[in-house]
Amino acid sequence: MSGLKLEIVKADSLSKGDVDLWHAMVAANPDLASPYFHPEFTRIAAGVCPGAAIAVLHRQGEVVGFFPHQRRGGTIQPLGAPMNDYHGVIARPGDGPDLETVAALLGASRLSVNAWVGPAATGLARDTMMTVLPDDGYDSWYAERRSSFGKFFKDKERARRSMEAELGPIRVERGLRDPALLDHLIDLKREQYRRTSRHDVFACGWTVDLLQALLQSDHAGFGGAMAALWAGDRLCAIEYSLIGGDQCHFWFPAYEPELARCSPGILLSLDTMKLGAVAGLRTFDFGFGGESYKKYFCNARRTVHEAVLLRPGLGASLSRAAVSMLNAGGGDRGDRLRTSVRRRWNAIEACETRPMARLLGAASAARAAVGKAGRALGPA
């Protein structure tokens, strides 16, 4: 990747030729098959995300790549973080530099990525999970899944009958763009963050603006949209997805907690896929694993990299020393603790641009870290 030069520009300074080239690069590179790599995502995100910019990569006078990003002090993150579930250099196959080269070209004190698509020699490899429908559609996929995981899917069929018996007929709609419905979804998510002691990514404001702006996009084949499930007159579950071409990225799901026994979120995902398949959607991306239900849905995986690249110095040395001390207690406790704390801090740093909000978030993260460190140093 020698001979690369980098130019930092604002998103609104890209020419029509630049945008056309971006489209051509995405179309030519199967690794970029995600709505997050669509130029419209970058245009919209750059309009609301503080510190937004685009690194334009040149070689011998020609543009060979784009990397949308945002700055938080000395830290560089993908544009839209922590909301951006896939990121990397927009380039033709084989033309994109690796993660380490991008970090060197940007010259940041810290480059943080959690789902880097493209070559990387650093960091943790992680798999995301997705459903790719066969050519003959949803019904064929469901029949295969039900045959392979009969107990799970029969249980969901019983849950559907139970919900209908209790509340009334189930109705699902997709492609919804009602701002009031989005407000309700965000309220549900914020309550979930409080219950689970996770950082509230919507408290900062600009992340809400991002979802609203994506919902209002009128670009053909791209945009944010919601699906919702009602039983009788009761709204039971909502999911915000990002759509690009035949790709649907399930993004923010929420459901009424008191209806958890009926699995309304899972029923909504099933019906969203069925309706989406009729509309031409073929790939449904569930993001990282973790929730057990995903293994019953997904038949494909994608490997990405999570990494923090630090400029050599005292901070990097102290981080390695602390991890080594924890690991000395047995196993990989230090590495696991560092990963957990880093993820929490990355979300705080990305969301919060005001010093006091960042300080409060850091205090919360520190309390969680102390608790985890105590457990890490306890018996193996």
Image (cartoon, rainbow, N blue to C red):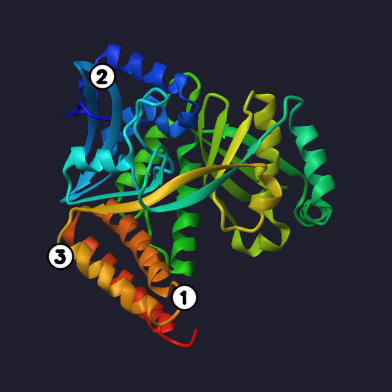
Q: Residue at x 81, y 48 (%)?
A: 148
**Looking at numbered disc 1 in the image, what kind of residue is underneath it?**
Gly
Residue 50 appears in the rendering:
no
Which badge, 2 or 1, is on the more N-terminal residue? 2
Q: Could you tell me which secondary element the residue under label 2 belongs to? A: strand
Which badge, 3 or 1, is on the more N-terminal residue? 3
Q: How far is mark 2 from mark 1, CA to CA?
A: 46 Å
Residue 108: percent from the left, percent from the top?
17, 46
Q: Residues within 10 Å of mark 2 (few under 14, many from 20)?
A: some
Circle 3 residue: 314
Q: Residue furthest bottom?
A: 379
Which picture quadrant has residue 282?
top right
- Label for residue 63? 2
Circle 1 residue: 331
**Looking at numbered disc 2 in the image, what kind of residue is underneath it?**
Val
Q: Identify the image quadrant of the N terminus.
A: top left
Indicate whether 183 appears above or below 34: below
Residue 263 appears in the rendering:
yes
Q: Of 370 and 164, which appears nearest the observer?
A: 370
**Looking at numbered disc 3 in the image, what kind of residue is underneath it?**
Leu
Indicate whether 188 appears above or below 60: below
Task: Give left or right: position of 274 versus 165.
Answer: left
Q: Residues within 10 Å of mark 3 (few under 14, many from 20)?
A: few
Indicate whether 242 appears above or below 353: above
Q: Residue at x 47, y 62 (%)?
A: 191
Q: Residue at x 71, y 34 (%)?
A: 274
Residue 287: percent from the left, percent from the top?
53, 46
